[in-house]
């Protein structure tokens, strides 16, 4: 079960070499920190789709979804379903104002509206949220690598960190976007084939319904309404509030391309979750005693043609690396532009900022390795939902006000929202009952503070057409 055949290995190596070539080729486009972080605003919709899906369709959407489906069934769909809805909202309501504001990061938008103090506050909490999702990707990689090779989990984590660092450090958004397109095509093939085989192996709908109890396995809210509603909602607001997806949209060569990229992402992401659920259910029905996190990797190794299996294993590894590296790039960009360039070295030139961004990538991944050593058996999607929720709690309400209510919210209330809302989420994880997700009170508090800031505001509203 833990030894790959020659065919597995050959398909794995060839696929990795192909993607490595694409990453190297894309890295030749990097000539400045602007190219590295926003693609120099030269990306078409396909590259934007690659950048968005390259991060959203990763370990959580595949390995994590199969793991949660193995345990709870249909509620595992909330990650990819919520991500799709979030991309739809991004395309319809946020892509155009994001693009026209001509800012490199979300904290820059907040600083422009609420003062410089908004930058470091939002940067800290958003980066913590993104960091939690990097943890989820490394956990996914550990499940994948230990399913392929006889290896200690910590050694697998080290390998995963090295792959993520290599994946993004020479490519930035161009690497994540172009490689993301190739990865998405391969991943769709992998999940489609796996989903069909699992569906047939379970005996179709009649076999599935006869094998599993209706609750929780066929209940979209099988873990409890508020738990699963908050999970889906965290993805919607998390997509809007995350630097990585903002970065992908503003890298477009036009508003039309930015909207198109986000809209295509909204359409193609949710089906991947359905395939992951079918695979998780198949492994639960036939191998109920395995580690749930290994459901998808072991399915690929033992139930697919080994030539195709090697390609799929490489694609899953690339998917995990793409998500982890994309989030790492987001954190590093925020640090370089909103902390280093403003508070540490305001005179830093473009070359220095590019070097700081790359060094920050190495630092973030090194901290991830230290953090993950005590959490190697965690539920992958638990970290992903928590990550999106924390980002959304920090940014969503004040960001909406900065875009759609410019100058109409008192800055003090907006700053309070950025602090109290994420702290409510973090503290709530320890003091609230398990059936209540702290994201709900966190978001409500943030929105109430923004509403209060609008009531007590004494500022002169800004003209919406005056985009900085």
Image: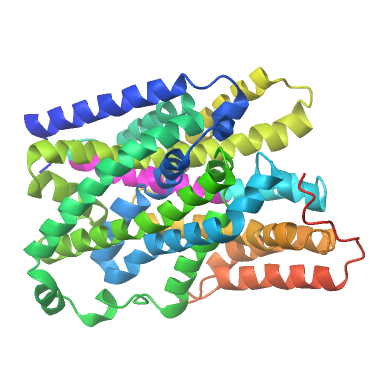
The quarter holding residue 92 reads bottom right
Residue at x 78% of width, y 27% of height: 346
Residue at x 14% of width, y 41% of height: 309
Residue 448 image offset from top left, x and y in percent: 72, 73
Residue 269 image offset from top left, x and y in percent: 36, 55
Residue extending farthest bottom: 214
Q: How many marks?
A: 0
Point out the stretch of residues depicted in magenta: 129-147
Residue 94 visible? The answer is yes
Magenta stretch: residue 134 in it? yes
Residue 29 image offset from top left, x and y in percent: 49, 22
The quarter holding residue 312 reads top left
Residue 433 image offset from top left, x and y in percent: 50, 76
Q: Nearer the viewer, residue 93 or 419?
A: 93
Q: Nearer the viewer, residue 40 or 386?
A: 40
Please state if 434 lies on the left or on the right of 140 as rendered.
Answer: right
- Relative to 292, say whether 111 is above or below: above
Please state if 304 lies on the left or on the right of 267 as rendered.
Answer: left
Please state if 356 lies on the left or on the right of 65 as rendered.
Answer: right
The quadrant of the picture occupied by the C terminus is top right
- Relative to 314, say whether 228 is above or below: below
Looking at the magenta stretch, what is its main secondary structure?
A: helix
Residue 120 visible? The answer is no
The quadrant of the picture occupied by the N terminus is top left
The quarter holding residue 71 reads bottom left
Magenta stretch: residue 101 in it? no
Please state if 340 lies on the left or on the right of 48 as rendered.
Answer: right
Q: How is the image coloured?
A: rainbow
């Amino acid at each position: 079960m833990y030894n790959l055949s020659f065919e597995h290995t050959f398909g794995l190596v060839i696929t990795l070499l192909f993607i490595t070539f694409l990453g190297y080729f894309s890295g030749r486009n990097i000539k400045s920190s602007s190219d590295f972080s926003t693609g120099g605003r030269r990306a078409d919709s396909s590259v934007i789709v690659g950048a968005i899906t390259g991060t959203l369709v990763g370990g959580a959407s595949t390995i994590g979804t199969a793991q949660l489906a193995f345990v709870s069934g249909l509620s595992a769909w909330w990650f990819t379903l919520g991500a799709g809805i979030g991309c739809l909202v991004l395309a319809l309501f946020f892509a155009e104002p994001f693009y026209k504001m001509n800012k490199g990061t979300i904290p820059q938008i907040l600083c422009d509206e609420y003062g410089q103090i908004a930058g470091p506050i939002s940067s800290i909490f958003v980066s913590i949220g993104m960091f939690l999702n990097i943890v989820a990707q490394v956990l996914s990689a550990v499940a994948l690598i230990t399913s392929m090779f006889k290896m200690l989990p910590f050694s697998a984590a080290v390998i995963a960190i090295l792959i993520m660092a290599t994946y993004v450090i020479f490519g930035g958004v161009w690497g994540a976007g172009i490689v993301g397109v190739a990865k998405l095509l391969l991943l769709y093939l992998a999940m489609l084939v796996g989903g069909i085989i699992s569906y047939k192996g379970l005996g179709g709908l009649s076999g599935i319904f006869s094998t599993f109890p209706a609750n929780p396995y066929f209940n979209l809210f099988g873990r409890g309404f508020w738990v699963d509603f908050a999970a889906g909602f965290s993805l919607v607001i998390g997509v809007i509030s995350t630097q990585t997806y903002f970065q992908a949209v503003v890298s477009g060569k036009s508003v039309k391309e930015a909207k198109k990229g986000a809209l295509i992402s909204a359409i193609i992401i949710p089906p991947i979750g359905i395939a992951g659920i079918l695979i998780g259910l198949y492994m639960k029905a036939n191998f109920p005693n395995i580690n749930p996190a290994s459901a998808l990797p072991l399915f690929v190794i033992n139930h697919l043609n080994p030539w195709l299996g090697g390609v799929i294993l490489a694609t899953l590894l690339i998917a995990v690396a793409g998500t982890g590296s994309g989030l790492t790039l987001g954190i590093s960009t925020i640090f370089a532009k909103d902390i280093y360039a403003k508070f540490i070295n305001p005179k830093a030139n473009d070359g220095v900022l590019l070097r700081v961004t790359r060094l920050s990538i190495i630092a973030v991944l090194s901290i991830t390795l230290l953090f993950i050593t005590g959490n190697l058996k965690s539920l992958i999607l638990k970290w992903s939902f928590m990550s999106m929720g924390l980002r959304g709690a920090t940014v969503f309400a004040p960001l909406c006000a900065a875009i759609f209510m410019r100058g109409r919210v008192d800055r003090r209330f907006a700053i309070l929202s950025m602090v109290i809302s994420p702290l409510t989420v973090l503290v709530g994880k320890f003091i609230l009952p398990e059936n209540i997700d702290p994201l709900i009170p966190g978001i409500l508090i943030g929105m109430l503070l923004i509403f209060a800031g609008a009531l007590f505001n004494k500022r002169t509203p800004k003209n919406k057409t005056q985009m900085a």
